[in-house]
Image (cartoon, coloured by chain):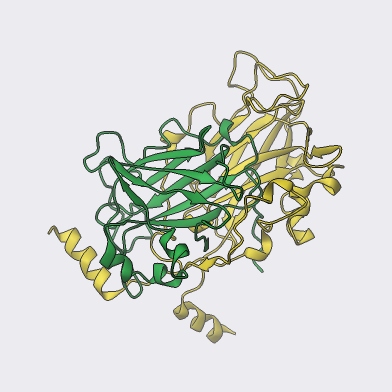
Amino acid sequence: MTTSEQSAASSAATGLHVPGYIRDHEVHPPLDYPGYRSTALRHPKRPLTLLPHMLTEVTNPVLGQDRVGETDHDLTRQHAEEPQGQRIIVHGQVRDSDGTPIPHTLVEIWQANAGGRYRHTGDNWPCPLDPNFTGVGRTLTDAEGRYRFITIRPGAYPWRNHDNAWRPAHIHFSLFGRAFTQRLVSQMYFPGDPLFFQDPMWNSIPDPKARERLVARFDYANTVPEWALAFEWDIVLRGQEQTPFEDTEAEDDE
Amino acid sequence: MPETTPSQTVGPYLHIGLPWADGPFAAAEGTPGGLWLRGTLYDGAGAPVTDGLIETWQADPNGRFAHPADPRGAVPYPGFRAFGRCPTDATGQYAIHTLKPGPVPGPAGPQAPHIDVSVFARGMLHRVVTRIYFPEEEAANAADPVLASVPEGQPRQSLIAHSTGDGYQFDIYLQGENETAFFDI
């Protein structure tokens, strides 16, 4: 047995406590949501079993710059020419619910083109593809948890969930954070979209205030003159629970 | 209530954004001890889910994580990323090349070797999470506190993979009589 194996075996024998992450179920949509028809056969019906957060749950892959190509953050520079549409900057900060920024974490995005069509074999509604737009981006947050993409504003598109159903314009986001518990896939929307009222994705979020957290803020200060409008969208992942020791300290301070 | 960002579905077009060319290789090809973890994702009608995404996360063969939250130190394991990502194909199948994890310390002693799994798909407004355990680890499984917390019988059995010629089979049933046990994470 090597030294590391011995130390692993000994901590396994004595027990290892790690701080868990705050559970935030009330924030998220239910898995069973009749307004979104495809949930019907794709949600578990049995109660979930509580999984205490242990080592596997408080860790996750540490992904580096090797996952990100040179033009991955700029969706307007991935082809010979620029894509059609309104050029935009989408930027923001990734942090924990206690306000701690999450540095060097992978942010992945995908989206439709300016007309609302995805470069995907399953999307064939009558809207042209743009030969200069793939609609996929990746970046790592910086030391302060900030990310920045350059892209074009995606269009709304129809789908068949209900009569005259249209998805509000959105960009899909995938986040890792720093723990398995923090993994999040979501969608960023644009302010003032008139399609929210009939969108089951939007309406599935129980708390109207939580829905608003998916809407980017138009950011005039970071809009670049004669080049691109800016939108700011901060992403907040679950924070860590305080350890019992820290709880005691907090009480003493009060 | 923490003011966290709500989840939304990956939708039907996740394939343009999420799969990586090396996604299925939690362990690089040729890594000693490499095995294939395969399975099919099913919906409540027993139909394969052909537009899902499976992600796996696990300890290395020594039960350790190359991550700063592992108090024993973040030690990389050669050829091993520990994270796998694979979209389901036209038959609902996924395949991840990985290594068998070692036992992982827990608050009340060692946990049986296990792999954490996230399932994403159109029609799922949030991921679901499950765990894979190993059929040959009978004693460790019997002592595992997480397995013990899952109702006995089919639900608990649903978390044990089956041995195959080159690894393990772990089918995932989102709903129905064979429904996989899922966790509140």
Return the x and y of residue B175 as percentages of the image width and height.
Answer: 58, 54
Quadrant location, the N terminus of chain A? bottom left
Instruction: Tell me the colour chain B is drawn in.
Output: green
Residue A229 rendering spot, x and y as whole percentages: 75, 33
Colour that chain A carries in the picture:
yellow
Residue visible at 20% across and 65% down?
Answer: A7
Coordinates of residue B132 in the picture (x, y in percent): 40, 55
Q: Which residue is pictured at 51% across the width and 45% down the height?
A: B41
Residue B80 horizontal/vertical position (percent): 31, 43
Query: Going 54% across and 80% down the picture, which residue do you hit?
Result: A250
Left or right, residue A41 beside residue B84: right
- Front residue of A17 and A66: A17
Q: Does the rendering let one see residue B185?
A: no
Q: Observer-nearest residue: A19 or B143?
A: B143
Above or below B110: residue B74: above
Decide: is A7 above or below A91.
Answer: below
